[in-house]
Amino acid sequence: MTASTPLSPGLTQALTTAAQTSKAWPFEEARKIIKRYEKTGYPAEVLFETGYGPSGLPHIGTFGEVARTTMVRNAFRVLTGDTVSTRLLCFSDDMDGMRKIPENVPDRKALEPYLHMPLTVVPNPFGGEHPSFGHHNNAMLRRFLDTFGFDYEFASATDYYKSGRFDDILLRVAERYDAIMDIMLPTLGEERRATYSPFLPISPKTGRVLYVPMKAVDAANGTITYLDEDGEEITQRVTGGQVKLQWKPDFGARWAALGVDFEMFGKDHGPNMMVYDAICKALGGRPPEHFVYELFLDDKGEKISKSKGNGLTIDEWLAYAPTESLALYMFQKPRTAKRLYFDVIPRAVDEYFTFLSAYERQDEANRLANPVWHIHGGNPPAGDMPVSFAMLLNLVSASNAHDKDVLWGFISRYAPGVTAQTHPKLDELVGYAIRYFDDFVLPAKTFRSPDAVERAALETLEASLGTLPADADGAAIQDAALDVARGIERYQDHKKTSPDGGPGVSVAFFQMIYEVLLGQERGPRFGSFTALYGIAEMRALIRKALNGELA
């Protein structure tokens, strides 16, 4: 995924015109920002923000916010002719107290003494150069964002609080304390209301983030008074990193302090959106434009969580597929809950290259609706992928090959002139396919023996393939397979009609081939796959099945 900066040279009048009516969701969101300033004119800078809670290892949902916000930012730049300065701020709430120890960190017991301390104070359980757990998780997020080439500025809540950048807004919270309490208290249960305060002091004795009621708030002196954990009354300033804000007031206060124009967040924040907005207004700010996206689910249909470590991590997706496939997954249907697990990867890979291949043939309007325009910031690369990822997975399965050179032997025969040097992206996919097959496909494969009807069908198919020239194309091979199936009553589909007027072929025929030859319920188009794998190789595979060497 490319950064936003290169977009301007690719702008044309036709593109800008097409963007005005594009129904792609990033353009619809960008038009809200334009409407925001249609009466007043634009400020010196339009600020896009994403928030990140580094309480656990970053997951793909975190990345999704940055990817999607970048897409809206790029759409805004096209709609405005790239004449308005924009900035994307990735803000880490790393001053939050560690309320529970994540399940997926080493030596969890060693972190117990640091419960409720700011994440940037908690020791780094992973060791290495980063001084704290918060710094470590921030570095992981930045490393991934940098891998994608995002144009962003990283911001740490710890830095903003301690450096004084939030001092003015914190003093304003003290000044308008009652107004903020009036917003917050109706949203809380009776017990919580009795002790609630938007200020969370950092104990000068224990260093813990304290959820305690205020005995006094002195706006004139910028101080709060409360009872520390040992019962001693403490008065301390609200500035200089001595306090932080509760998470709901923190949202609205940050918007007011920074002048945020656009921020998206997950559906779980949706019910609080009016609270965030009200606090921002109470502090003299203007709430940003919002986009609420649906949550990602794991393989069991449960919400993915940083602390649980369910679903996919950033590194796990990238171990099996290129970055562009993940960006496509983020672009598609952001308001629909989607499973984010390993089995979605192959389809995302192939859909990306299908969209990329279509891009060169499209006019401006259709290009703006094509996900690759948004994934690559308006500058997608040339698309040429002669073999699909699904096909590669089945090639690994049928050939039992775990070496890229062996697979390239099949590919180069199928597509003369195509090599790892001429098609480096395909070479990447070959490596991904081997790894994905070994880890996910192979453990789930279950071969079965053919029954008498299936055995006869496979014997006929093997003999029929032997009549074809070695370089027969996929269409010829598919026709030969269909001809075999049409003569077998079990595989006749009387709801379909064959070219000679007889019954068509049931999908059960090809399902049988997949189950017996590949050990799986679904597979590629038989003709196309056999053209890639080789007719002689397919005949040999059928003979293995008939000899009982697969099941």
Image (spheres, rainbow, N blue to C red):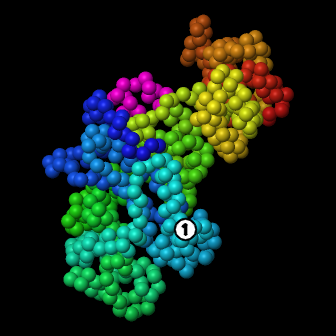
Q: Which residue is at the far front?
A: 9
Q: Does the magenta stretch include residue 424?
A: no
The residue under label 1 is 130
Residue found at x 35% / y 36%:
9
Q: Residue furthest bottom?
A: 232
Q: Is residue 488 left or right of residue 103?
A: right
Q: In this view, does 510 lie to the left or right of 467?
A: left
What's drawn in magenta, residue-wise? 354-370
**Relative to 540, is 214 above or below?**
below
Task: Return the x and y of residue 4 as percentages of the image width and height.
Answer: 39, 45
Q: Residue 537, position in %: x, y? A: 77, 24
> Which of the two residues, 314 or 487, is positioned nearer the viewer here?
314
Quadrant (top left/top right/bottom left/bottom right) for the C terminus = top right
Instruction: Please state if 282 lies on the left or on the right of 59 as rendered.
Output: left
Decide which of 236, 131 is in the foreground and name it.
Answer: 131
Considering the numbered disc 1 on the image, is that residue within a helix, a strand or a loop? loop
- On screen, 361 above or below 63? above
Q: Which quadrant of the figure has residue 227?
A: bottom left
The secondary structure that dominates the magenta segment is helix
